[in-house]
Image: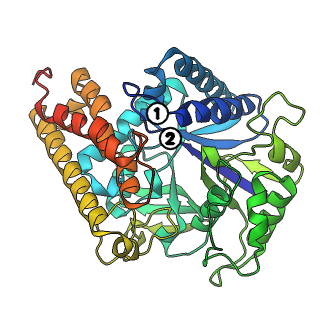
Amino acid sequence: MILYDLIHGYQPFDPKLKISGWVRRNLNDVFLPTSLSMKKGLISRGVQLQGWTIKSWLSADPEIKESARKVLKNLEIANQKKHIEIGISAYAHPILSMISDDLIKAQLILDQEIIERYLGRATWFWPPEGAIDKRTLNIVHQVFPDLILLIPDKSLGYNNYSGPVKIRFADGDQKAIVFSTIFKNIFMNADNAHGKSKYKRRPKYLPKELVFSQVRKTVHSHQRFIELLGFLKGYEFQKFTALDDLVLMRDWENAGSRQGLRKIGQAKEMGVFLDSKSQIDFCLPSQFDWTDSKVIPISKILPSAWEMTSTLGDPFPWWQPNKQGRIWRERTELRRKKIIQWHGLIKEFDLAFQKRVKQLGGIKKALKNQQFKNLCFETFPAVHSCVGWHYLVKRNWSNYRYAEKTLKNIVYPALEKMIIDKSLKI
């Protein structure tokens, strides 16, 4: 069985503010031990870290900074030894479809600068929240024509598919890996930090033959993990042929085992995955065979995201104020007003950004201006996607990372600085 295991690491926080316990726990209990296992070559993975996360780690207090340096060094060595392959995304995790062409380009280029400075050369690209459309993919192709693209199955019109394809652009083809949103949701939401299922009821989209009570055990039992992969591999979804390659795209926090991966130094250093290596061939993104892969014209790409609730009529359900979408209709009037307010802030930030770019002679010249780049690094978190996501779902806003305090402490100051900062010489 061949498995391409791709993980995305993102910790949205501002080091100038009070740093929450979850930031330290994830860094020390998840990122650090798994990065050590990657350095040792115990497993092959595609690894993507957000540029803003790295900058925040290295600007935080000495404890976080020291742990972060160890994580980054482990990953750099793992990348050099070809145990892992590094992915690039957008610096501050925005929904790319919501921002202008120039702002997308700047987010991509600055993320590449940070990632390759600390981790080395990248081979693949991950759009934040898997959110894409034709315009954003065309821009990504312009900036990263040689990287392997990662796209959700719904962008091809499938409800479940994973494997290699090629996207045909005006100037040629680009390799892409399609990941299944069903796989993502099963393996990310089967278990939460307290060992309890995130689902109150069985999700309707899961195959009827799948024993859902066993799904949660996949993060603790290598045998359950293998059984579930085997079931998914042989199952035909929407009359599509059985899958040859399985692709898992997950947040880093959900990509291991609390029994093993996060406790390096114990007898079973890799937990479920170490026991699985004799039965699963873990491969890197570049190891796909694209010889006979299907070619998809860019004109056929549909707007979509990695959320199971994403549909053609409502492709970005947690972020776009689409009044036709089910998620939108289910929210209270107050939350609907807030998401519209958030969209207004993003547009205001984008207009201020575009004005500065124009004054500097275009995006290429602007990004050669170190003062402007520093301003971008400092202010780009104003458009990060967690603000909208936490507006639309019920969350405890007592922690600054959630929307109310994020707006007050991160978004508004960044917006103000982008608009009125006079230190930039133009």
Say which residue label 1 marks.
53
Task: Choose top left, top right, bottom left or bottom right for residue 292.
Answer: bottom right
* Residue for badge 2: 10
Which mark is first along the chain, 1 or 2?
2
Above or below: residue 29 compared with residue 341 = above
Classed neighbour count for the residue bearing mark 1: other residues with Cα under 10 Å, few (<14), some (14–19), many (≥20): many
Q: Residue furthest top?
A: 62
Q: Amino acid at mark 1?
A: Thr
Q: Is residue 104 above or below residue 215?
A: above
- Residue 391, image x, y percentages: 36, 56
Asked if labels 1 and 2 touch by Cβ distance under 8 angstroms, the answer is yes
Q: Nearer the viewer, residue 367 or 205?
A: 205
Residue at the outermost bottom position: 239
Rendered view: 249 above or below 11:
below
Q: Position of residue 80 (x, y in %)?
A: 65, 27
Dot 1 falls on a residue whose secondary structure is: helix
- Name the residue located 72 percent from the left edge and 48 percent from the top edge: 283
Q: x%, y% of residue 138? A: 35, 56
In what quadrant of the picture does the N terminus appear?
bottom right
Q: Nearest the camera: 34 or 258? A: 258
